[in-house]
């Protein structure tokens, strides 16, 4: 069996780490070998963040080889666009419809590019745009946007719902569990 | 057996626990920080932060001399600080097993240089193990203690960012039992390194290296894997994983111990393959030694000396050299977009200080921490940054070369944790030799850069227990600084005045800022209803508030050629009021 390569990208502080932990846990529970890698430190302070998660029968490298990404899981539009060159042309993209302005844009020196979604669609046609914030509010907490997105990503993977549920139960703190499970189901049904 | 997904750092912590370690000490440094933060969960281990890496190593040397297994952890640049005791430790050898974990940072994801710590192992003449994933991190940690005791040597274990922060599956084991109880044993001939004793020890150190190399020849952590005989690759650590991915048909000699090298095994492997390569990150460490054995090998001729490797880079190197043929990989084409560098947090107490330093035209000798980000636009307020503690001594030196009016501009900037790490010695020097520079100690009550670790001035230990607090102002005075002032960096006018006063002074002085890092929960934080807002009618679009580069303030251009206006994101603003003080038109107010 070949390896499936997932990249989670966004801005430091968006909950990318937790989402990638849940993914990795689910793949292990489903019986796969799994490796994951991201950079901590500087990048947490509002910088660009990318987390690699790979699963399959046997995984060697903890980083996704350039141009071999299968699923791009984007928490922020500009960052989703930034990491497209790591993907395959027929990759699946799940993008949060959400913008965070980089410093140069905040200072008015550069502009946040227009029409990113359309640009992305012409490069990778298989793109699902998710209004994470709105759906997370429906689930009961705006902070569960990453779990909504995770649900949407899970829909692209052949792993049983019960496994996802146990992974979430293990990784999410008890008091936030109900909201997160609800958010996950909303995302999965997209 | 219980399986878990662990990071390399978590797995090293687990390995220390399973090996029966009794004492652990470290100074935080990315990517090594989480080792100790995980060891603290194993209550059988006495673990603590040390003020710096030299002290951390000396603490575990003590524990080892007392017969306990002990571990010190640091990042690559930390080994430079710990190098002094490390060299002599090689001569004394150990009591209980002693492990020094060092985490390198190829590609400098969060470091000031990318030194290759394997050189230390050779320089110090101690064995170095290099795990290739979390599973091996745990296994090798356990093996390191056995090796340490068997050969009476400290052992180094080298990780790198991808191993430390990468995660993979680990099977958990039980801790060993039956280790000897620690007790005091006198053995001055071995432990007192006066010339007479040391001369006796040196030949033993040399002999140990030879014996370790022989041991490596039959040790299964050095593993040959024969596939196609066309290409044979010697590799270790994470590079092994990249090689397996990039060149699945190649035969590999995967080294678990990268120093000393198993020469017999290397000769055997070289004889069985048509072309031999070494693929390694950074220095030609293995390659040079293999060449010195008289074996023909290709290495840095095709693999870069700089930065991290990856399966893609390895495949490209082999293909560019005409060794393999791979189809052209055309990456998806995208347009240039704005970069997103890291930034100081909204409400960061450093922001106001850097703003005033830049207004005063200060020449800032900087140090290692969050505040290093002060060099970035729009603050542009840092001119040098070398290593921990260097800010103060750099300032001390530069003023000696300058005419008086230039001397006044020199300001050293250093954080509380860094000050206690090695800034202390530098300030002692500055006071002693009366260098007329100004030192600003950014006391935000925590080691912020690595993720909020306690330090001797924060009043808490690693395990969260209340501890005596180093009083930084008193300490500065005790070192001989006569002018010590404390200022609130959120108060721009006061900060300006104090800085100006001290910069004008022709003797050494210290300014201490007193706002806690805004990531310390509950402390120095404002309530959610304290956020500020820009009154869109009063905002003239003068852009004054943008000059501090707070991520919560956004420039909103006007569509019709008119001036744009500033906007504050209420979800990000912490209510620190620094921007408000910059607005001459009273356009920034509190949301109530
Ligand atoms: S972590 Fe603390 S010290 Fe560092 S930038 Fe953020 S607020 Fe400032
Ligand atoms: S008060 Fe101003 S400077 Fe402070 S966090 Fe809010 S927007 Fe940023």
Image (cartoon, coloured by chain):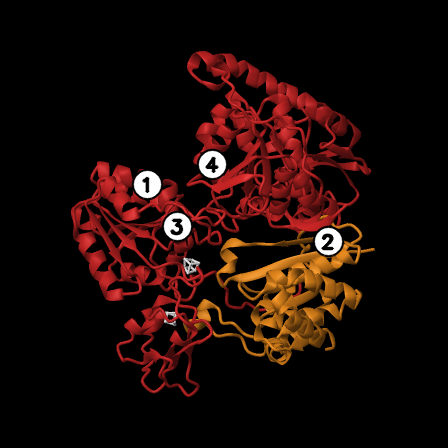
Chain colours: A orange, B red
Q: Residues within 10 Å of mark 2 (few under 14, many from 20)?
A: many
Q: Is residue B63 above or below residue A100?
A: above
Q: Measure the C-alpha gap from mark 1 to mark 2.
A: 45 Å
Q: Secondary structure at mark 3?
A: loop
Please tell me if label 3 and label 2 are on a single chain.
no
Between disc 1 and disc 3, whose residue precedes? 1
Q: Is residue B18 left or right of residue B273?
A: left
Residue under pointer 1:
B424
Image quadrant in which you'd find residue B298: top right
Asked if the residues shown at circle 3 and circle 2 are in contact, with their CB atoms under 8 angstroms apart, the answer is no
Q: Measure the C-alpha gap from mark 4 to mark 2.
A: 34 Å
Chain to which mark 1 belongs: B
Q: Measure the C-alpha gap from mark 3 to mark 2.
A: 39 Å
User: How many numbered circles are shown?
Assistant: 4
Please tell me if label 4 and label 1 are on a single chain.
yes
Q: Residues within 10 Å of mark 1 (few under 14, many from 20)?
A: some
Q: Measure the C-alpha gap from mark 4 to mark 3.
A: 18 Å
Q: Measure the C-alpha gap from mark 1 to mark 3.
A: 16 Å
Residue under pointer 2:
A34
Chain to which mark 3 belongs: B
The residue mark sitting in front, 3 or 2, is: 3
Residue under pointer 4:
B56
Q: Position of residue B590 (x, y in %)?
A: 35, 78
The residue mark sitting in front, 4 or 3, is: 3
């Amino acid at each position: 069996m070949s390896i499936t390569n997932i990249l989670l990208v966004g801005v430091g502080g968006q909950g990318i780490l937790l989402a990638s932990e849940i993914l990795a846990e689910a793949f292990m529970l489903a019986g796969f070998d799994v490796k994951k890698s991201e950079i901590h430190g500087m990048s947490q302070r509002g910088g660009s963040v990318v987390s690699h998660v790979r699963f399959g029968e046997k995984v060697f490298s903890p980083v996704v080889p350039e141009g071999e990404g299968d699923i791009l899981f984007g928490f922020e539009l500009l960052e989703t666009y930034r990491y497209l060159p790591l993907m395959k042309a027929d990759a699946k993209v799940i993008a949060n419809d959400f913008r965070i302005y980089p410093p140069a844009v905040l200072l008015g020196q550069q502009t946040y590019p227009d029409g990113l979604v359309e640009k992305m669609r012409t490069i990778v046609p298989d793109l699902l745009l998710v209004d994470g914030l709105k759906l997370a509010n429906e689930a009961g907490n705006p902070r569960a946007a990453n779990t909504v997105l995770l649900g949407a990503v899970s829909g692209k993977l052949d792993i049983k719902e019960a496994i996802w549920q146990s992974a979430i139960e293990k990784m999410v703190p008890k008091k936030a569990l109900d909201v997160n499970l609800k958010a996950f189901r909303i995302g999965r049904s997209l | 057996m219980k399986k878990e997904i662990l990071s390399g750092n978590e797995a090293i912590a687990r390995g220390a626990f399973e090996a029966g370690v009794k004492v652990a000490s470290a100074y935080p440094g990315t990517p090594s920080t989480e080792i100790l933060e995980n060891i603290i969960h194993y209550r059988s281990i006495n673990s603590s932060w040390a003020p710096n890496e030299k002290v951390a190593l000396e603490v575990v040397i003590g524990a080892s001399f007392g017969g306990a297994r002990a571990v010190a952890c640091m990042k690559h640049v930390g080994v430079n600080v710990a190098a002094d005791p490390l060299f002599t430790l090689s001569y004394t050898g150990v009591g209980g097993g002693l492990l020094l974990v060092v985490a390198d940072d190829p590609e400098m994801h969060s470091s000031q240089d990318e030194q290759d710590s394997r050189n230390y192992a050779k320089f110090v003449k101690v064995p170095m193990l290099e795990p290739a994933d979390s599973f091996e991190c745990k296994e090798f940690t356990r093996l390191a203690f056995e090796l340490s005791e068997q050969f009476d040597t400290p052992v180094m274990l080298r990780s790198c960012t991808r191993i430390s922060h990468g995660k993979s599956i680990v099977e958990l084991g039980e801790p060993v039992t039956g280790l000897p109880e620690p007790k005091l044993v006198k053995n001055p001939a071995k432990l007192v390194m006066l010339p007479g004793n040391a001369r006796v020890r040196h030949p033993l150190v040399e002999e140990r290296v030879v014996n370790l190399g022989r041991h490596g020849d039959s040790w299964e952590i050095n593993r040959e894997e024969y596939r196609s005989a066309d290409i044979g690759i010697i590799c270790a650590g994470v590079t092994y994983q990249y090689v397996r991915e990039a060149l699945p048909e190649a035969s590999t000699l995967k080294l678990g111990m990268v120093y000393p090298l198993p020469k017999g095994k290397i000769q055997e492997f070289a004889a069985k393959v048509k072309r031999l390569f070494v693929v390694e990150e950074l220095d030609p460490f293995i390659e040079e030694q293999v060449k010195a054995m008289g074996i023909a090998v290709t290495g840095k001729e095709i693999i870069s000396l700089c930065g991290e490797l990856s399966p893609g880079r390895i495949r490209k190197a082999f293909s560019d050299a005409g060794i393999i043929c791979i189809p052209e990989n055309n990456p998806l084409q995208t347009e240039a977009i704005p970069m997103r560098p890291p930034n100081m947090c909204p409400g960061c107490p450093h922001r106001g200080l850097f703003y005033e330093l830049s207004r005063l035209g200060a020449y800032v000798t900087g140090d290692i921490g969050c505040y290093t980000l002060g060099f970035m636009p729009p603050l542009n307020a840092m001119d040098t940054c070398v290593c921990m503690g260097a800010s103060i001594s750099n300032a001390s030196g530069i003023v000696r070369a300058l005419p008086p009016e230039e001397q006044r501009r020199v300001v050293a900037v250093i954080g509380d944790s860094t000050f206690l790490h090695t800034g202390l010695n530098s300030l002692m020097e500055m006071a002693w030799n009366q260098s007329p520079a100004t030192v600003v100690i950014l006391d935000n009550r925590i080691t912020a850069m690595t993720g909020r670790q306690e330090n001797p001035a924060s009043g808490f230990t690693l395990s969260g227990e209340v501890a005596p607090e180093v009083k930084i102002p008193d300490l500065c005075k005790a070192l001989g600084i006569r002018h010590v002032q404390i200022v609130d960096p959120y108060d721009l006018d006061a900060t300006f005045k104090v800085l100006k006063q001290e910069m004008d002074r022709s003797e050494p002085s210290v300014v201490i800022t007193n706002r806690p890092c805004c990531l310390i929960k509950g402390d120095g934080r404002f309530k959610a209803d304290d956020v500020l807002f820009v009154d869109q009618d009063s905002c003239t679009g003068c852009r004054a508030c943008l000059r501090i580069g707070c991520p919560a303030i956004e420039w909103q251009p006007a569509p019709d050629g008119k001036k744009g206006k500033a906007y504050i994101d209420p979800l990000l603003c912490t209510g620190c009021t620094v921007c408000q003080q910059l607005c001459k038109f009273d356009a920034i107010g509190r949301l109530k």
